[in-house]
Image (cartoon, rainbow, N blue to C red):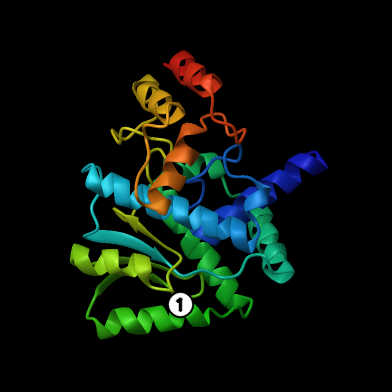
Amino acid sequence: MKKTKLFNSIAAIIVSISIMLSSIFSVAAFDTEYISEDGMKLAYRIINGYSKLSAEKGLTNFKTSAVYCGLDITKPYLITLAGYFYITNGVDIDRASGDNEYTVTTIYNLDKFLKKMGVKNERAAQLKSELENQNVQILLSLDTAGLYIIKSDEQFSKSLLKDEKVDFVLSGGGVPSSMKDLNFDGKSDKNDCELIQKYLAGELVYDDNDKNEYIKFACDINGDKEINIVDVTELQLDG
């Protein structure tokens, strides 16, 4: 494997690890520039935007949610651990994008690995205590990674979107089939083209920063950080 390809692969898993849902974003669409404090905050806004919109459109709901309170993966030590985990476990990012069971297993193994290496997540400990105090049903608890799958009333889950300890809340609690789904039918295809054109015309705007960040991300089909007719054409060609 060439050095550049290896670096990109490690970078991709670092990002995936940091959001605890491997390959919600493809390598092309979610690259190394997100490995910074500001970059991660943007990534979390994108995920929260997806959650809000997909729930509003009826694709998901907040009764079951993935709540993430992550580690600071900009630290060199954690970057090194992430790269080691990726290489030694043969993590398949492409598979994770469509295989929720594989993703959860990978995250579970990551959590055990980080715990074994002495990594602690104090923010996650505070969040878990808060969830337990609210008698929230925790379906999956990965304390070091900082990922919790919870079952609760929608109002409480939505309130976590404003909790400073929480990086993101993913409605539905599982890996989305597509994170570039503008009409929220569960896939990215030519049926989304009209919405990209509406975005280009300035007609697809919300009074919510998270939602707007998701729309901007989802419209950039080829991941070149520019939204234009090329993205529409690419979707049309893909069918």
Measuring from the top left, give residue 211's x and y in whole percent. Answer: 38, 48
The quarter of the picture where residue 225 lies is top right
The quarter of the picture where residue 105 lies is bottom left
Q: Which residue occupies the foreground of this view, 142 or 123?
A: 123
What residue is shown with label 1? Answer: 124
User: Can you say whether 234 is above or below 74 in the image?
Assistant: above
Instruction: Look at label 1 and name its amino acid.
Output: Ala
Farthest residue toward the top?
A: 237
User: Can you say whether 121 is above or below 59 in the image?
Assistant: below
| 137 sits left or right of 22 in the view | left
User: Can you say whether 151 is above or below 216 in the image?
Assistant: below
Q: Residue visible at 28% across and 63% down?
A: 158
Q: Residue visible at 42% across and 83% down?
A: 126
| 35 sits left or right of 234 in the view | right
| 35 sits left or right of 219 in the view | right
Measuring from the top left, give residue 146's x and y in whole percent. Answer: 47, 71
* Quadrant of the rendering where the C terminus is positioned: top left
10 Å neighbourhood of mark 1: few (<14), some, or many (≥20)? many
The answer to whether residue 42 shows anywhere in this view is yes
Q: Residue visible at 69% across and 63% down?
A: 79
* Quadrant of the rendering where the N terminus is positioned: top right
